[in-house]
Image (cartoon, rainbow, N blue to C red):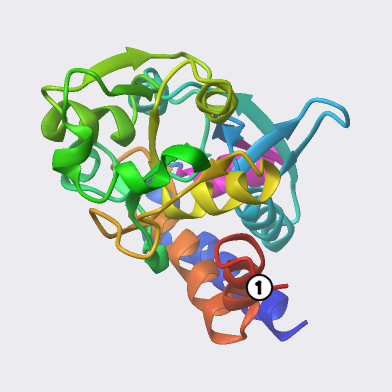
Amino acid sequence: MLRKIFLAIFVAIIFLSPVGNVEAGHLEEILARGTIRIGTTGDYKPMSYLNKKTGEYEGIDAELSKIIAESLGVKIEYVPTTWPTLTQDTLDGKFDIALCGISRNYAREKVLEMSDGYGVGIFGKTILCRKADAKKFKTLDDINKPNVKVMINPGGTNEKFALANLKNATLIVHNENAEIPHQISIGKADIMITETVEALNYIKADKNLAAPLISKPFTKHSCGILMQKGDQEFLNYINFVLAEIRMDGTLEKLENKYLRGIE
């Protein structure tokens, strides 16, 4: 309750401020519209995943989306996007913010705005493979061979990591990220480059899969909420929401549930 009161005060201050009314920002537009448009790929467990049976989005980013919308007193309007088009769709203003397990990195920050990070110290690039092959892959050198088939989804940081570090491996592009674990399981490829949190989810769901290097990821990073540059007040508000739920323990509970596998 206190969190909602603080957020309401924050919004009121922005709109009562003369500076805030000089340029019509996203907060003003969102409140007038009654909805917040959230871009998401819906293909990334446990971040943002479209459950085709229920038609609902699931994952930590779906939870964060609800918290942001509730703080503003508006409804969510999901706008589908893809990893190859995510940056351009954000630049084109197709949505107000994007949440789908988006890695914070310099390339994105140069052209877009990213919120403070969440999942700090949890995310990192790792591999998914068949359990029968787990002992074969202990280092990047074990993977970076012509006879090793690495399946990646286009447009995201998984593809960038593979292109930069696995130049000798056989790279196979598969457009549907959520389908790749099954492709590995049935032998269409040997390796999936993925995030630790995604790997944890898939090895629980498929006994034929393994993530032998999950405790020693190749990289470490956090995720953030993506938006256009140029609206500092909107960015401040999003960061304020994250700070509030970090302070009251809500964010840690969500990270434990979705990212650490702790109920």
Q: Position of residue 217 (x, y in %)?
A: 30, 57
Q: Quadrant of residue 133?
A: top left
67 part of magenta stretch: no
Q: Position of residue 232 (x, y in %)?
A: 33, 55
Q: Position of residue 255 (x, y in %)?
A: 57, 68
Quadrant where the N terminus sits is bottom right
Left or right side of 233 for 157: left
Up-down relation of residue 85 to residue 253 (above or below): above
Between 117 and 20, the one lying in front of the other is 117
Whether residue 100 is visible here, answered yes or no, is: no
Q: Quadrant of residue 8?
A: bottom right
Q: Secondary structure at mark 1?
A: loop
Up-down relation of residue 233 to residue 32 (above or below): below
Left or right side of 150 for 106: left
Residue holding disc 1: 262
Whether residue 179 is visible here, answered yes or no, is: yes
37 part of magenta stretch: yes
The residue at the point 67 percent across, 80 percent down is 3
Quadrant where the C terminus sits is bottom right
Between 207 and 51, the one lying in front of the other is 207
The residue at the point 20 percent across, 39 percent down is 142
Between 28 and 186, the one lying in front of the other is 186
Region rendered in magenta = 25-38
The residue at the point 70 percent across, 79 percent down is 5
Q: Amino acid at mark 1?
A: Ile
- Label 1 neighbour load within 10 Å: few <14, some 14-19, many 20+: few
